[in-house]
């Protein structure tokens, strides 16, 4: 069956600064959280690869832009590396070398017919701010981030019309302070919640600046809500799914879209001693400065069940007090990544946005398939025959088009990623790109089969999918 892509529906791709740029041109003292983690725990990064070289995008961006033009890409999302944008994080003295690179890169995209979409923070919290102020624990960092955003807008908002404050704002503190599985391995659930709140507050303050200055564009945020399914129809399992959704999804979706936190959240925070510090003025700012649109990263579903064992009250509180994870028997898997493949989540999330979140405009800012050892699939000409990626994109895009036709206000699909890139810990282990990065040959680029397929998708605005039942 042939599926047609709606008119004006974006088909793009994305990446981030730290995952591609490398450290060429980086000055002393400009480390980000990711840089410092890598320097302190290089052994946990797959085969020792990290952000030091990445894809050397800082020097080779024009090659990638040329490939975007060849493929016909119309939109590209990446980030500005906050840690590299300043020489002094207190006085906010701009690193003019790095700022000029952003100028050249943005201009190059526009010249190639590619619309830039920029994120202000994609895990690139400056180490200086982490060390001096304990990162997003501090309202000082909220203020500095707000000033950073204003400087960036003044420089680039004349050309860049799509902005995001954060990418996946829940992730860093979940890995470091909630689960304590990443550097600096500090378990502190109250700090986790404070970081979540301050990123919401920072977004509201940045939205206020963007709107007050009347820039010609849109300001939003990229979230990674986990579409959560209960194991069964039992009340206990449904309650487990509701609690997971509350702690990991709604703590961002509700204040950013509706302007207020869920009422049921605050008694739970008090019960478990993890209340975040806030003022009435801050809550008012959040209420009056909701985002224009959402970027949504969707890779896999999340399945939970009622907890099987009694929680040890001596253990620091974790939201897992209310749920256990559940693995669906017979599920389709991406075995390289360990993630379930479930395109239906596009439909379910899209309808939730339509029904529960004012049908706010949204775009899939990340969806993709990371596969290990893709060299297995090279043909005699050295082209990766990634039919699995083509199938994955087709299935998810089909569901996304269907939910859009059903009334959800989705504006487009951005593949992760345009090129292979470094991921936290996994580095280059799992490849996501339309474009292959050859680690053994000076990071040379080459198109995979999926790149040619994506080019045809963009040109024809159609693709083939298997028959599927209609949405109810």
Image (tube, helix red, strand yellow):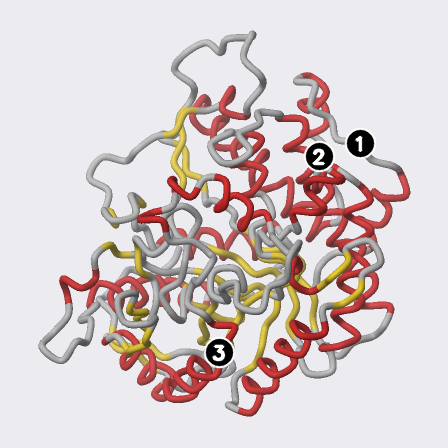
Residue toward you, 302 or 79: 79
Q: Please, what secondary structure does the residue beneath circle 1 have?
A: loop
CB atoms at circles 2 and 1 under 8 Å apart? yes
Q: Please, what secondary structure does the residue beneath circle 2 have?
A: helix
- The image quadrant where one finds the N terminus is bottom left
Marks 2 and 3, how far apart at CA: 37 Å
In the image: residue 18, left or right of residue 453 = right
Q: Which residue is mark 1?
A: 277
View extreme (right): residue: 281
When the figure is inspected, residue 114 is found, relative to residue 323, above or below; the finding is below
When the figure is inspected, residue 432 is found, relative to residue 269, above or below; the finding is below
CB atoms at circles 2 and 3 under 8 Å apart? no
Q: Which badge, 2 or 3, is on the more N-terminal residue?
A: 3
In the image: residue 158, left or right of residue 16 = right
Q: Which badge, 3 or 1, is on the more N-terminal residue?
A: 3
Q: Please, what secondary structure does the residue beneath circle 3 have?
A: helix
When the figure is inspected, residue 319 is found, relative to residue 439, above or below; the finding is above
């Amino acid at each position: 069956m042939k599926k047609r892509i709606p008119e004006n529906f974006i088909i793009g791709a994305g990446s981030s600064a730290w995952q591609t740029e490398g450290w060429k041109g980086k000055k002393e003292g400009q480390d980000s959280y990711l840089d410092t983690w890598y320097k302190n725990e290089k052994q946990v990064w797959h085969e020792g690869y990290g952000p030091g070289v990445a894809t050397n995008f800082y020097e080779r961006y024009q090659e990638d832009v040329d490939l975007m033009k060849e493929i016909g890409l119309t939109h590209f999302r990446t980030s500005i590396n906050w840690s590299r944008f300043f020489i002094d994080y207190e006085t906010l003295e701009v690193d003019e070398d790095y700022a000029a690179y952003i100028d050249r890169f943005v201009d190059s995209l526009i010249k190639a017919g590619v619309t830039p979409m920029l994120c202000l923070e994609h895990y690139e919290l400056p180490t200086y701010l982490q060390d001096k102020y304990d990162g997003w624990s501090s309202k000082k960092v909220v203020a500095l981030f707000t000033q950073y955003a204003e400087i960036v807008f003044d420089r680039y908002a004349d050309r860049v019309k799509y902005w995001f404050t954060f990418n996946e704002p829940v992730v860093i503190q979940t890995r470091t302070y909630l689960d304590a599985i990443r550097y600096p391995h500090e378990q502190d659930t109250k700090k986790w919640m404070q970081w979540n709140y301050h990123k919401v507050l920072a977004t509201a303050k940045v939205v206020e600046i963007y709107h007050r200055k009347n820039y010609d564009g849109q300001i939003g945020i990229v979230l990674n809500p986990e579409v959560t399914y209960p194991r069964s129809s039992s009340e206990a399992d449904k309650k487990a799914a509701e609690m997971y959704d509350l702690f990991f999804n709604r703590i961002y979706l509700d204040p950013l879209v509706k302007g207020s936190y869920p009422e049921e959240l605050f008694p739970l925070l008090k019960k478990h001693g993890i209340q975040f510090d806030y003022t009435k003025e801050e809550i008012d700012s959040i209420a009056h400065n909701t985002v224009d649109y959402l970027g949504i990263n969707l890779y896999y579903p999340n399945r939970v069940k009622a907890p099987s064992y009694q929680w040890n009250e001596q253990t620091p509180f974790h939201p897992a007090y209310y749920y256990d994870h559940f693995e669906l028997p017979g599920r389709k898997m991406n075995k390289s990544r360990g993630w379930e493949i479930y395109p239906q989540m596009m439909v379910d999330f899209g309808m939730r946005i339509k029904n529960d979140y004012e049908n706010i405009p949204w775009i899939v800012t990340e969806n993709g398939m990371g596969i290990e050892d893709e060299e297995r699939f090279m043909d005699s000409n050295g082209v990766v025959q990634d039919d699995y990626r083509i199938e994955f994109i087709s299935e998810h895009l089909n569901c996304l088009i269907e939910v859009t036709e059903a009334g959800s206000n989705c504006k487009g699909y951005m593949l992760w990623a345009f090129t292979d890139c470094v991921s936290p810990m996994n580095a280059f282990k799992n490849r996501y790109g339309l474009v292959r990065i050859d680690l053994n040959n000076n990071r040379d680029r080459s198109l995979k089969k999926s790149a040619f397929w994506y080019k045809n998708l963009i040109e024809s605005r159609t693709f083939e999918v298997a028959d599927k039942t209609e949405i109810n």
